[in-house]
Image: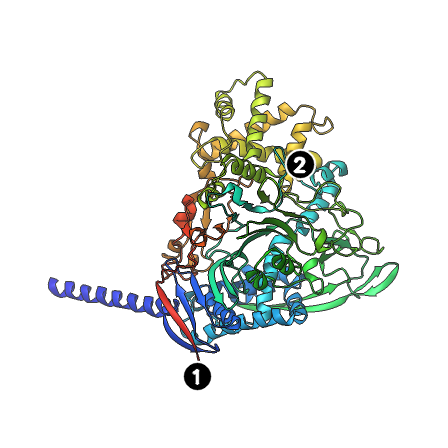
Amino acid sequence: MVRRVLFAVNILIAIAVIAALFGFYWYLYRALPDTGTVRTTVSQPVEIDRDHLGIPHIKAGTLEDAWFAEGYSTAEDRMFQMDGLRRLASGELSAIIGPAALERDRDSRRLRMRRIAEQVYVELSPSDKAVMAAYARGVNAYIESHRDRLPIEFILLGYDPQPWSVVDSVLCGLHMFRTLTSDFKSKLIKQQMLRTGEPDKVNYLYSPRSGLEILPGGDVHPGSNAWAVSGAHSASGKPLLSNDMHLEFGIPGVWHAEYIEAPGMKVAGVSLPGLPGIISGHNERIAWGSTNLEYDVQDLYLEKMDLNSGQYVFNGKLEQARAEREVIQIKGQPAEELTAWVTRHGPVIQAENGQIVSLRWTAAEPGFVANIFPDIDRARNYEEFKQALSRFGGPAQNFVYADVDGNIAYHGGGKLPIRQGWNGGVPVDGSSGANEWAGYIPFDQLPESLNPPEGYVVTSNQNPFPPGYAYQVTGGFDPGYRARQVHDMLRASGNKLAPADSLRIQKDVYSGFIRFIAQQLVTAYDHRKGASEPVFNAAIDLLRHWDGQMDKDHPEPLIATLSYQYIRKAVAERASPGSGEIYDGKTATAMIEKLLRERPKDWFSDYDQLLLQCLGDGIAEGQRMQGKDPKRWKWGRYMFLSIENPVITHVPLIGRYFDIGPVPMSGTSTSVKQTTKILGPSERIDTVLGDWDHSLMTLPVGESGQIASLHYRDQWNAYYNGTSYPMEFNHVNSSGTLRLVPLR
């Protein structure tokens, strides 16, 4: 009897194992990238080799076939991400997710994202259309050949992706445009603070510049954790170029690594899934990186408007707004209808408190969106690079450049509005006609630096516009802590820099700002001759000897950061009662540092008392989180990072296995390794010009978005520990090859 039971149990286990293996094969393994031969609509055979990290190396006989293969291979790795991205951009997530995505869809519809993309498509140059059309054909070839073996997310959510179009590629680019330029919400927060606050103080906290444009220790050129070093400072005698762009964490990550070779082009780096071309990387002659310029390209207008008729006043005359009807499909619920009014400035995005606010945004301006990266991918020198860059409409970016001839350069890019007068960063009267943009800054007058004498171009989102610049400048520029640290580390490293040195700088976690806060707390403590509570003494003793390193295993970063949060809230409350929780803009750190250095008496009568009170509040919060003794606290237990797979994480029992974390992180928003619980370096690229195979590149997670892939998260340990991988360029160790061949 026992034997029969055991036999039956073993049979059931065997059946379960076989069923699990079959399920793995049917639903997961079959969806992975193919090897072998696939007949499809290419004009000549194309080879796609996958290297040891799963990165596709495309070799095509024509450029059109190369873009086709890029679309195909990206879809192999990231089809669900691409579909989610176009849905997020166009406001169509609710159709597959349900009401949880409704507010995001409403935001996208109010911004008219799909309508803008359709307008952009009409205005694209024939060459841009041709590149995107070839890419779209590649994506669609993948979709059609994988209808019965799509990634598991499509099966779990119960839908198939629609065919890909050029408009969808434009939407992916527009979503990045939106991500990097949506400052209008901070303007609405400022307007809210002005309603209850003192205008002079609120305006002080929202400086149009960072307040720290001139950095101690030398002139620093702009960018966003990108830099170029001349051959005079490198071990190879050739320039180095590094780039790490700071964006939101996700699984999969923002970028897809690729190598593409076709007549007249041999390029490697990272692309944005859904959009053809390498955005940051190198070809055989040049290397480049791009990150956010932070220039303000959005304005809000108060409209004198009747929301029933759509009539509004402009320049003393009645005009008629355009009504646009939007229908949002919602999974499991009836569809929702929205009617949006669009004025000459743009869509009405808010109607409350008796005010009707419309938005003007450069992304919606005719002819502003162009995909210049296929041209940059083929550029051979700085002039060709600049020629491609001159077509760039946005999002406004800092571009860093280096070439094998020894040149290094920086150039601002994008269409930047010329304003006749700064509006204070709040909605302005749209009825008078007096606050219109007066064109855009000419490309040849944007900030530029070619071969600076010191041999460095260092960029980290700080203000690039010099004093006395011909045009009024507004933007949420970084205060400059990161740029100063990068610049100082490069100079301290001597003249034998290699990619490994650049990687070391990219992972640096020193925060000049948080150390400044710590020193302010110590000084205030000393002025008051100490405190009676032992916990105060222990905290101050730690801060007194702290070197500013935001190390995950140390307590000082937590003590200083929690104290700063209370300082920030106190300052905001002083400017506008009730605003302590909502003020935390891009320039908050610079404005608070400026305030603490200058100590104007009309803000606080006793700054030392303010600082000690905030220290006490910070210590109390830390004790609630991590216990009574500050010496036992750890920054990493506060700076926990969790990266979730957006769909798989919700699968019972096994879903969390495919997430990352929570893990303790070093760094902060003002360190070179800019890290928060939401965003961080989205890639790290360190190139050595001419010696391409010794260049380095790392993604945060992995190349593939498919959970069964060996490359789903195989780069995480290297990323987390600050190591990297060679960028295989001239020599590729293939782990598998797919050949795309013509249908006949």
Label 2 neighbourhood size at 10 Å, few (<14), some (14-19), many (20+)?
some
Which three-letter amino acid code belongs to the residue tagged 2? Ile
Image position of 676 with respect to 327: above or below: above
Which three-letter amino acid code belongs to the residue tagged 1? Arg
Label 1 residue SS: loop
> Is 20 on the left-hand or right-hand side of 695?
left
Q: Residue furthest bottom?
A: 744
Q: Quadrant of the C terminus?
A: bottom left
Out of 529 and 292, give the one closest to the viewer: 292
Q: Position of residue 510 (x, y in %)?
A: 51, 35
| Cα gap from disc 2 to disc 1, whole angstroms | 64 Å
The quarter holding residue 94 reads bottom right
- Residue under label 2, please give it: 214
Image position of 220 with respect to 381: above or below: above
Label 1 neighbourhood size at 10 Å, few (<14), some (14-19), many (20+)?
few
Sequence-earlier tag: 2 or 1:
2
Residue drawn at x 45%, y 78% as measured from the top left: 40
Q: Quadrant of the N terminus?
A: bottom left
Report how many numbered discs are placed on residues in the image.
2
Q: Position of residue 633 (x, y in %)?
A: 44, 32
Out of 436 and 566, give the one closest to the viewer: 436
Label 2 residue SS: loop
> Is 115 on the left-hand or right-hand side of 255?
right
Residue drawn at x 50%, y 45% as measured from the top left: 677
- Residue under label 1, please give it: 744
